[in-house]
C-alpha cells in the first residue's frame, strides 16, 4: 500500500517547532489547505503541545483552538485530531475528523463509538512528567508489547482502522528513539500499520550535532527529519507524521516505491 504523509498543524502558541505560527483559526485553516495542496493525505490538528515539560491546556481552551479548524478543513482533506482528551476527540469527530491520534491511551472508546480510525501511541506519564520515566530494561520489547496490547484492545472495542506508533521522544532518551527506529522492521512485522512521528524532534539535534558545538535547534533539523522519514518508509511504515509535507512527499515517492521503476515520472518539456 502507498504510504501516507500526515501533515502537522498545531493551533498552539507553544509547540516546539510550529508554536505560534498558526494560532488563529484563519491562518491555521490556510496552513492546513496548503499542506493538503502539498500532498498531505491527512492533516493532524492539535490544540495542546505534548513537548516534554508542557503544561496541560484546559478543555474549553483546547476545544476553542481545534474545533473551528477541524470543521473548516474536513471538507478539504482527511483530518485527524491530536489530543490526550476523550472529550476533545469526541467533539472533533463530530466536527469532521475521521482519525483520532490518541497520545494518551484514553480515546479508544471514542474512536470505537464513532466508527473512526485510531492511532495507538506509546508513552508513559504525561508530557509534564514523561522525562522522568525514560527507563527501560528493553525499550524495543516493552514498546512492542505495549502497542500490541493497545491495538488488540482497540480492535476488541470495534475500531477497524488502527495504527501503532512507538512515540518517538515520549518518555524516551535519544538512545531509546534510535533503538526504536532501528527496530522498525520488527514493529512492522508485528502486523499493525505503523506511524512514525520523528519530524524535527530533539534526538535529531543530538544526532546531527558537530563535536564541541551546540546541537541544531528544531529549525535546523529538516535534513535529518527527511532522512528518518525515508528510513521509516523504507522499513515499511504506513504513515509518517511531519511538519515539512512537500519535502517529505518527494522523499516518500522514492522511499515507498518498490521497485524504483514504479516511481511516477512527470512529463517534462
Ligand atoms: N508527536 C507529537 C505530537 N503528536 N502524535 C503521534 N501519533 N506521534 C508523534 O510522534 C507525535 C504526536 C509532538 O510533535 P509536535 O506536534 O510537532 O509538537 P508539540 O507536541 O509541541 O505540539
Image (cartoon, rainbow, N blue to C red):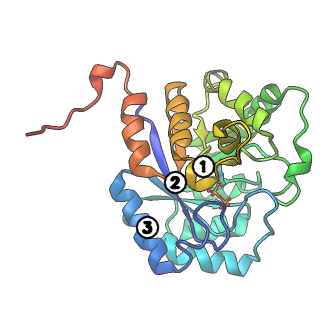
Q: Which residue is mark 2?
A: 243
Q: Is residue 28 visible?
A: yes
Q: Residue at x 75, y 73 (%)?
A: 57
Q: CA distance from mark 1 to mark 3?
A: 18 Å
**Of pointers 2 and 1, the one earlier in the residue sequence:** 1
The answer to the question of whether label 3 and label 2 lie on touching residues, with beta carbons closer than 8 A, is no
Q: Which residue is mark 3?
A: 31
Classify the position of the N terminus by image quarter: top left
Secondary structure state at the residue bearing disc 3: helix
Instruction: Tell me: residue 110, above or below residue 23.
Output: above
The answer to the question of whether label 2 and label 1 lie on touching residues, with beta carbons closer than 8 A, is yes
Pinpoint residue 134: horizontal percent, then vertical percent: 87, 42
Pinpoint residue 53: horizontal percent, then vertical percent: 82, 61
Left or right position of 79 against 118: left
Q: Which picture quadrant has residue 156?
A: top right
Secondary structure state at the residue bearing disc 1: loop
Instruction: Tell me: residue 158, above or below residue 38.
Output: above
Q: Are there few (<14), some (14-19), or many (20+) residues within 10 Å of tag 2?
A: many
Classify the position of the C terminus by image quarter: top left
**Disc 2 Cβ-to-ligand 1 distance below 8 Å:** yes
Q: Are there few (<14), some (14-19), or many (20+) residues within 10 Å of tag 3?
A: some
Q: Nearer the viewer, residue 154 or 167?
A: 167
Q: Which residue is mark 1?
A: 200
**Of pointers 1 and 3, the one earlier in the residue sequence:** 3
Q: Nearer the viewer, residue 110 or 142?
A: 142
Amino acid at each position: 500500500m502507498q504510504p501516507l504523509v500526515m501533515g502537522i498543524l498545531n493551533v498552539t502558541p507553544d509547540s516546539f517547532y510550529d508554536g505560534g505560527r498558526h494560532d488563529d483559526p484563519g491562518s491555521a485553516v490556510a496552513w492546513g489547505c496548503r499542506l493538503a495542496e502539498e500532498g498531505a493525505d491527512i492533516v493532524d490538528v492539535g490544540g495542546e503541545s505534548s513537548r516534554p515539560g508542557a503544561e496541560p491546556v484546559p478543555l474549553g481552551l483546547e476545544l476553542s483552538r481545534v474545533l473551528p479548524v477541524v470543521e473548516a478543513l474536513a471538507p478539504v482533506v482527511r483530518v485527524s485530531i491530536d489530543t490526550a482528551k476523550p472529550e476533545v476527540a469526541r467533539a472533533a469527530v463530530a466536527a469532521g475528523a475521521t482519525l483520532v491520534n490518541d497520545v494518551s491511551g484514553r480515546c479508544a472508546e471514542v474512536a470505537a463509538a464513532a466508527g473512526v480510525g485510531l492511532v495507538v501511541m506509546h508513552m508513559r506519564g504525561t508530557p509534564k512528567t514523561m522525562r522522568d520515566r525514560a527507563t527501560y530494561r528493553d525499550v524495543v520489547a516493552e514498546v512492542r508489547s505495549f502497542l500490541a496490547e493497545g491495538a488488540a484492545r482497540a480492535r476488541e472495542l470495534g475500531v477497524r482502522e488502527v495504527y501503532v506508533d512507538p512515540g518517538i521522544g515520549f518518555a524516551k532518551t535519544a538512545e531509546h528513539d534510535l533503538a526504536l527506529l532501528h527496530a522498525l522492521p520488527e514493529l512492522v512485522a508485528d502486523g499493525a500499520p505503523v506511524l512514525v512521528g520523528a519530524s524535527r524532534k530533539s534526538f535529531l539535534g543530538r544526532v546531527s550535532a558537530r563535536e564541541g558545538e551546540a546541537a541544531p535547534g528544531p529549525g535546523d533539523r529538516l535534513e535529518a527529519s527527511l532522512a528518518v522519514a525515508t528510513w521509516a518508509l523504507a522499513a515499511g511504515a504506513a504513515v509518517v507524521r511531519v511538519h515539512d509535507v512537500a519535502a517529505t512527499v518527494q522523499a516518500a515517492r522514492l522511499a515507498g516505491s518498490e521497485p524504483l521503476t514504479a516511481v511516477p515520472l512527470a512529463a517534462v518539456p
